[in-house]
Image (spheres, rainbow, N blue to C red):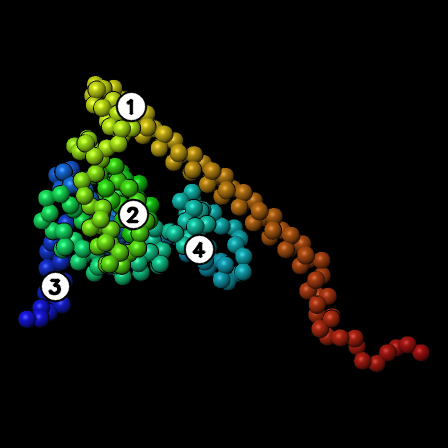
């Protein structure tokens, strides 16, 4: 008996698990995970004003003039193809949704494997920020406490093959017997520390991440200032050339030499 596609779609949706910061520990406990972080295509955020302004200026004038950006706007401008909300990424997300829903259905009910979604625009926003998601869709996998970036293909066959081969128990404090000697030594070292000392060490490493983000924003601000400076200089040079009579020179050349002559 053939099952209507709409019913298959409903079944896949029913088995979908959406993770948030609040339910993450509960849903992922004891499992190796495969998680897609997304910004749903049916609810896109409004276009970034700076990108819209820049695109308009480039189209109408052929160059940028008197534009200012905050750090995020400028970074999105100079890396527009990888912008979190670019059209390319939305198309990717839309195309892979049926395949991902099918994959979630394949692993539904597993005691050791979890394939799930995180909506980075609603309840899952904090979780996306916590794990460092910068673009959508992003896929991560592995130990729930130590997620790794998935770099493989995004067709159903690619995703299913990867899941079958890799969604197995991995090295972790709960599966220390699967760890190599170096990882095992690290785990034992951290387990031997007091909770206060471990918390302090975690804060030190998290501070490094915060410092890296701050440094990035500072450097982007410098780029923005330099960009504005160069843009202003370029516009001044263009106006100077126009004022030198270039337009008139071209008009004279186009008109050609006058017919007739006053020469004797």
Label 4 sits on a secondary structure element that is helix
Label whose residue precedes the other's in the sequence (3 or 4):
3
The mark lying in front, picked from 4 and 2, is: 2
Image mark for residue 8 = 3
Total marks shown come to: 4
Residue depth check, mark 4 versus mark 1: number of the one nearer the observer: 1
Q: Nearer the viewer, residue 93 or 175?
A: 175
Residues at marks 2 and 1, CA–CA distance in whole angstroms: 27 Å
Image point (18%, 43%), residue name:
168
User: SS at mark 1?
Assistant: helix
In terms of sequence position, does the residue under pointer 2 or pointer 1 come before the other?
2
Judge whether residue 136 can be spotted in this image. no
Q: Tell me the residue that label 2 is attached to.
A: 150
What SS does tag 3 mark?
helix
In contact (CB < 8 Å): disc 2 and disc 1: no
CA–CA distance between discs 2 and 3?
27 Å
Q: Quadrant of residue 22?
A: top left
Q: Earlier in the sequence, mark 1 or mark 3?
A: 3
Work out whether 218 lies above or below 79: above
Quadrant of the drawing holding the N terminus: bottom left
Q: Is residue 108 left or right of residue 92?
A: left
* CA separation in Å, label 4 and label 2: 34 Å
- Marker disc for residue 201: 1
Q: Which residue is mark 4?
A: 53
Mark 3 or mark 4, whichever is nearer to me: 3
Q: Nearer the viewer, residue 128 or 230?
A: 128
């Amino acid at each position: 008996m053939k099952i209507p596609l709409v019913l298959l779609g409903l079944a896949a949706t029913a088995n979908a698990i959406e993770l948030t910061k609040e339910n993450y520990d509960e849903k992922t406990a004891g499992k190796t995970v495969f998680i897609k972080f997304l910004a749903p295509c049916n609810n896109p955020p409004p276009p970034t004003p700076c990108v819209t302004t820049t695109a308009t200026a480039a189209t109408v004038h052929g160059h940028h003039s008197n534009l200012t950006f905050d750090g995020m706007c400028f970074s999105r401008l100079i890396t527009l193809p990888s912008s979190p909300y670019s059209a390319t990424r939305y198309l990717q997300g839309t195309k892979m949704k049926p395949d991902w829903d099918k994959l979630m259905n394949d692993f539904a009910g597993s005691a050791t494997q979890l394939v799930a979604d995180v909506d980075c625009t609603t309840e899952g926003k904090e979780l996306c920020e916590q794990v460092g998601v910068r673009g959508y869709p992003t896929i991560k996998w592995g130990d729930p406490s130590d997620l790794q970036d998935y770099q493989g293909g995004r067709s159903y066959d690619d995703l299913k093959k990867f899941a079958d081969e890799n969604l197995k128990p991995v090295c972790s404090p709960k599966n220390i017997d699967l760890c190599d000697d170096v990882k095992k030594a690290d785990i034992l070292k951290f387990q031997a520390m007091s909770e206060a000392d471990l918390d302090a060490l975690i804060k030190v490493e998290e501070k490094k991440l915060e410092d890296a983000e701050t440094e990035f924003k500072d450097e982007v601000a410098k780029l923005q200032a330099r960009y504005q400076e160069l843009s202003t200089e370029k516009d001044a040079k263009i106006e100077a050339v126009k004022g030198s009579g270039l337009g008139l020179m071209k008009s004279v050349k186009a008109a050609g030499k006058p017919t007739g002559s006053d020469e004797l």
